[in-house]
Image (cartoon, rainbow, N blue to C red):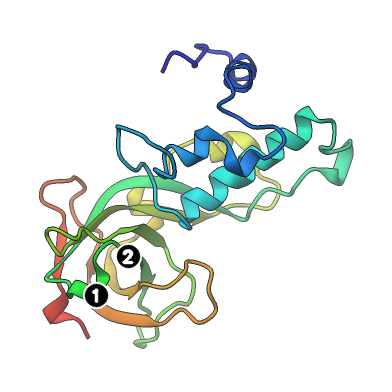
Amino acid sequence: MSWIVPGNPYATLRLLTDRKLIDLDKPEESELRTKPLVLVEHGGGPKFPLGSDTDSRWTAFLIDYAKTVRLEGYGPGDAFPKLPLRHSWLSELQIKLTDLPDQFDGELMTVTLHRMLSDGRVEDEPVAKGQSTANPKQNVWQNALTVFLAVEPRSGMQQFSEPIGIAAAIPKGKYTLKVTADAPNSPAQKILARYIFDAPWPPGYQPPKTLSWKDRQ
């Protein structure tokens, strides 16, 4: 991590550019993206899946930064993007799916956690989401969930830098977990499995919240 300049994000980005890790002409082909995706040789293994939400956000950042350096970025005032109405934060809540069919080996899978209302209806908007590829050797999928929380439209940036408490994002109650395995933003995305259980559960990698594919609804 010799390219990080402590306490100076601007200098860090300049150093990444000078070392050709960020390509200002083709930012989506920057090594800062292609190496974590293992699109080029990388001894550390994949850091996030190709086509995942993380990949999309990382690529958008690189494109945005390149435009700014090339003076093609934002002008003053309302030209800047508006802040989202939902704050997201990577939690320590882990979900593990076991006994997966061989057809999912190495495939990008997404789980979304939805609150169940007192009348049995399920909210459309998820309170948490996880995304990773299935492990082809063990027929399992495991990932930490990113939790979401609504924010006021005029919230400042400080709120987005603060962690979300699990209890605030996921109050105790019944929840439905939906599992999909198509492209993350595809309108044809199909729900392959559902689970109903109480949440939240104790955070941590060991033990995670474990669900067998055989018990899906």
Q: Position of residue 209 (x, y in %)?
A: 17, 60
| Horizontal arrangement in the rendering, residue 57 relative to residue 65 (left or right) | left
Kindly identify which residue carries mark 1: 103
Local packing at callout 2 (Cα closer than 10 Å; few below 14, some 14-19, many 20+) is some
Q: Is residue 87 visible?
A: no
Query: Foreground residue, 112 or 36?
Result: 36
Label pair 2/1, CB-CB below 8 angstroms: yes
Query: Foreground residue, 1 or 123?
Result: 1
Q: Residue at x 35, y 58 (%)?
A: 130
- Which type of secondary structure does the marked residue at label 1 adopt? helix
Kindly identify which residue carries mark 2: 107
- Which type of secondary structure does the marked residue at label 2 adopt? loop
Local packing at callout 1 (Cα closer than 10 Å; few below 14, some 14-19, many 20+) is few
Query: Foreground residue, 207 or 138?
Result: 138
Q: Residue at x 41, y 39 (%)?
A: 36
What kind of residue is marked 1?
A: Gln
| Horizontal arrangement in the rendering, residue 190 relative to residue 137 (left or right) | right
Q: Quadrant of residue 137?
A: bottom left
Q: Is residue 2 above or below residue 131?
A: above
Q: Quadrant of residue 164?
A: top left
Q: Position of residue 5 (x, y in %)?
A: 52, 12
Query: Foreground residue, 116 or 106?
Result: 106
What kind of residue is marked 2?
A: Glu
| Horizontal arrangement in the rendering, residue 53 relative to residue 154 (left or right) | left
Q: Is residue 177 visible?
A: yes
Q: Residue at x 17, y 46 (%)?
A: 205
Instruction: Specify the quadrant that holds the C terminus.
Output: bottom left
